[in-house]
Amino acid sequence: MSTKKIHAQPPEKLTGIKLEEIPTSAVGFKAIKSAISHITNEVGLVKGIGLLSKLNQKDGFDCPGCAWPDPDEKRAFLAEYCENGAKAVAEEATKNRVSPLFFTTHSVSELSELSDYEIGKKGRITHPVVLHEGKDHYEEISWEEAFKMIGDELNTLDSPDEAIFYTSGRTSNEAAFLYQLFVRQFGTNNLPDCSNMCHESSGAALTETLGIGKGSVTLDDFNHAELVIVMGQNPGTNHPRMLSALSETKKKGGKIITINPLPEVGLMRYNEPQNPIKWFGKGQELTDIFLQVKINGDVALLKIIMKLLLEKEKETPNTIFDHQFIKENTTGYDDFIKDLETSSIDELIPQTGIDFDIIKEATDLISQKKKIIICWAMGLTQHKNSVDNIRELVNLLLLKGSIGKQGAGTCPVRGHSNVQGDRTMGIWEKPKDSFLDNLENEFNFKAPRKHGYDVVDAIEAMHQKKAKVFIGMGGNFISATPDTEYTAVALQNCDLTVHVSTKLNRSHVIHGKKALILPCLGRSEKDIQAAGEQFVSVENSMGIVHSSSGHLTPLSDSLLSEPAIVAGIAKATLKDSSTNWSSLVKDYDNVRNKIEATIPGFVNYNTRVREKGGFYLPNNAREKDFTPTHTGKANFTINEVSDLHLEKDQFIMMTIRTHDQYNTTIYGLDDRYRGILNERRVIFMNPEDMKIKGLAKLDKVDLTSHFNGEERIAKGFLVIPYSIPKQCTATYFPEANVLVPIQSKARISNTPTSKTIIITIHKK
Ligand SMILES: Nc1nc2c(c(=O)[nH]1)N[C@H]1C(S)=C(S)[C@@H](COP(=O)(O)OP(=O)(O)OC[C@H]3O[C@@H](n4cnc5c(=O)[nH]c(N)nc54)[C@H](O)[C@@H]3O)O[C@H]1N2
Ligand SMILES: Nc1nc2c(c(=O)[nH]1)N[C@H]1C(S)=C(S)[C@@H](COP(=O)(O)OP(=O)(O)OC[C@H]3O[C@@H](n4cnc5c(=O)[nH]c(N)nc54)[C@H](O)[C@@H]3O)O[C@H]1N2
Ligand SMILES: [Mo]
C-alpha cells in the first residue's frame, strides 16, 4: 500500500479573493460574455458556437446542466441555453485530456493535493485505467480485462448485498434501465443515487400527500399563474432558464413571492438573454415580496400564513379557501385546522426572523389568488424536517385548491438533467413490488425484494465493511456526500471501487484497494453501435420524455457508451442471465421496447420519442386524480416546525452553490452574483453577528460543527458580511461537506442536512 497521504478534502489554501459590488440584476451582457469566454477557453469559439446551436434544439442534445424543460413550441436558435448551460457544455467538450500517459506522470497522492477545480480542469478521460493494489499510479487496461476484474470481484462476494451501485442523475433512461436490470439480476437493490441527497424529501412528501413523487405543473402553467412562490431556490444560478418562465408570469400580470435567507440576485431583477437591446438595461423586476426567512424557518412561516388565511376565512367565509376542492378531493382537513388553531403566531414568529407586517402583506396577496404555483429546491429538502417543509406547502396549495388546474400546482425544480428519469427507470433502493413483478415477467429471473442501501446507509455499510465493492455510474461520490473524512474511510475500506466517468474527479483518488476508471461518451458525442447511430432519451423536471443525440465525434476511440459499459459488466458477471445484453445494446430501440413492456406510461415509446419535443408521462396530480395515495384522496398533514436549538455562540450554516460550479464540478472560482471573485473558502455572515463576535470583513476563521457531542473542523475561511438573517451563515459545497455529520439527516427521506449544520466560528 502507498504510504503517501491521500487528501479527501480540498486543500485549505486561499486563492486570492477579490470583492466587487453585487450586481442588481441577473443574466444580461456579463452572462453572455462569461458563456462565450468559458466556451472559447475550453472548446474553441467556432466549435463551441456549433455545439451551442444544437443545445436543447429538437434535433439536438439535452443540456447536461439542469432539468428545467424546454418550451413545447417555439425554440429560438442559439437561445435555449443559458450561461451555465454553456459552461456545462464547455466542461464536457473541453480540449484537455487525461490519457494513460497523464497517469504515468501524475500519482494518485499528488492529484489528491489539488482542489476539485484543479482536478476537474485536467480534462476528459480517454482510456480505461486500473489502479492495482498498493500502487500510486493508474495504468491503462483493456475493456475486456476491466469487465472481467469487476465480474470476478462481484462473484467472490458472500452476498450481492455487499456491493453498492450508485447513480448520478445524468445517466440516460436507456443506460439507467439496463443498469438497474443488471443490478437486480445480480441480486440486490443497493441502488443509491444523487436523489437521496437532493429531492428525496420532495418525492416522499408528494407521494404521501398527492400520490405522485413528481411535480404537477407544466411550463405553460407559468403563463397562467396568478402567483408563483419560489422557496429555497436560486434559479439565477442553478436554473437560469426558469427566469424566462417567471418573466412570462410577470408580463401576464402574475406576482412572485420569494422565500429565502438570501436576496438572490437572479430572483430580484432579470435581463432577457434573447433580446440584446435589453442586455444592458435595469432589467425586469421579478420578486414582488421578499420574505427573508431564517434557515429552516419555513414550516413556521407557512403555519403563520395559513393561520392568518384561516382568520380571514372566518371573517369572510368561502372567499379564501376553496371548499369545493377540499370537500371533493382531500382528507384530513378538520384535523389540520384543529392543529393550526393550537399553534401560536407569537411563538412562531421568532423562528422565521421576518417582520410580521411583511408576512401579513404576503398573506394578503396569497388570499386573493386562486392559481398558485410553488417552486422549490434544496433550501427546503436538506433539513431534518424537510419532508415536513414540503407537506406543509402542499397544505397551502390544497387550501387554495391550487392543484390539478391550469396555472397552479407543485414545482419541485430538479437538479441533474435526468435525475427524474433515472427514478422512473427504477434507480431506487426501495422499488415497488409491481415494478419488480414486471421485471421478473419480462426477463425471467427472481428479483430481490429486500430494500437496499440509500447514500447514507451505503456509506455506513462500507465504513463497517459490510459492503466491499462500490460502482459509480457517473457522479463524484466523495465530494458530493456528507462527512468527507468519514466517507473517505468508507470508500478506502472497499476491495474495489469503479467509476464510470467523463472527467477526472476527486472520487478517482479516494479509492478502494483496487480501482478502475471507465471513461464514457458525453451527451454531446455521437453514439455508434452495431445497428448504427443511436440516440438516448431523458425526462425533464416536468415529466416530458424526449430524445437527445450527440453531434461531436467522440474524443477517443476507446470510449464506450454507458449502455455498452453496463452490458459489458453484466456479461462478465452474470453467468446464467437469459437476457441478450448484446442485442439490447446493438440498437437502443430494443432497450426502449423493454422499458415500454415494464414501466407504465411508455406506450409506443419508440414512436413517440421520435416526435419532436417528445411526450408527457401520465401525472395523476396534474389531472386532479389523487386515488394513488394511501387514502385515495389528497392528504392534509400535520407538520413539525424545526427543533433546532442553538447554544450561545452557535450559528446555523447552509452549504450552497456558487455561480461557477455544477455540484462538484468547479467551472471557475467566482460567485459573480454574490460579489465574490477568485475564492471559494468564504463564510457569509450577518454584519451584526460579526460585530458581536468581534469579526471584521475578510478575517480568517476556522469552523467547527457540533452534532450529538461530536465535533468536526474545517479550517481557513474568510468572513464576508452579507444580507443574511441573524444567526445564519452560508458556505460553499463541497469545501464545507466535512462539517456535515453522517448521522445528521432528514426524517423519512434520510437526506443529509446540508442546509442546517450547527457551527461555531473561531478567529485564527
Ligand atoms: N449552474 C448550476 N446549475 C445547477 C447545479 C449547479 O451546481 N450549478 N446543481 C443542480 C442540482 S443537482 C440541483 S439539486 C439544483 C440546486 O439548486 P438550488 O437548490 O437553487 O441550489 P443551492 O445552491 O443549494 O441553493 C439553495 C437555495 O436555498 C436557499 N436556502 C437555504 N436554506 C434555506 C431554508 O432553510 N429555507 C429557504 N426558504 N431557503 C433556503 C439558499 O439561500 C439558496 O438560495 O441545481 C441544479 N442546477
Ligand atoms: N454540502 C452539500 N452537499 C451536497 C449538496 C449540497 O447542496 N450541499 N447537494 C447534493 C445534491 S443536490 C446532489 S444532486 C449531489 C450531486 O452528486 P453527484 O451527482 O455525485 O455529483 P456531480 O458533481 O454532479 O458529478 C460530477 C461528475 O460526474 C461525471 N459525469 C459528468 N457527466 C457524465 C456523464 O454523462 N456520464 C457519466 N458517467 N459521468 C459523468 C464527471 O466525472 C463529474 O466529475 O451532491 C449533493 N451534495
Ligand atoms: Mo441535486
Image (cartoon, rainbow, N blue to C red):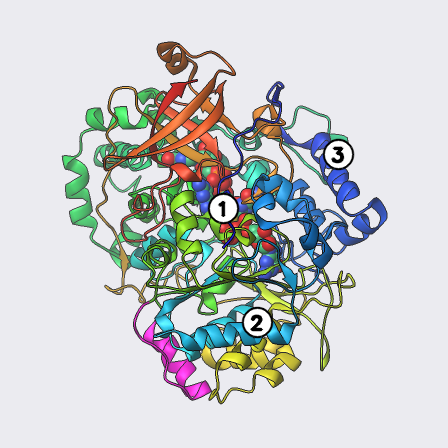
- Can see residue 325? yes
Amino acid type at image mark 1? Ser
Q: Which of marks 3 and 1 is in front?
A: 1
Q: Which residue is label 2 attached to? A: 174
Relative vertical location of residue 51 with respect to residue 285 in this rendering, above or below:
below
What residue is rendered at 67% in x and 60% in y? 522
Asked whether 754 or 417 is in front, the reply is 754
Q: Mark 1 points at which residue?
A: 479
Residue 292 is at least partly visible in this image: no
Specify whether 494 is left or right of 22.
left
Q: Does the residue labelled 1 lie within 8 Å of ligand 2?
A: yes
Q: Where is residue 346 in the image (x, y as percent from the top left)?
A: 21, 24
What segment is highlighted magenta in the picture? 431-451
User: Which three-letter amino acid code belongs to the residue tagged 2?
Assistant: Glu
10 Å crowding of disc 1: few (<14), some (14-19), many (20+): many
Asked whether the beta carbons under mark 3 and mark 2 sit within 8 Å of each other, the answer is no
Q: Which mark is residue 33?
A: 3
Inspect the image, locate mark 3, and give the three-letter code of the amino acid beneath it: Lys
The image shows residue 725, relative to residue 670, as above or below, that is above
First along the sequence among labels 3 and 2: 3
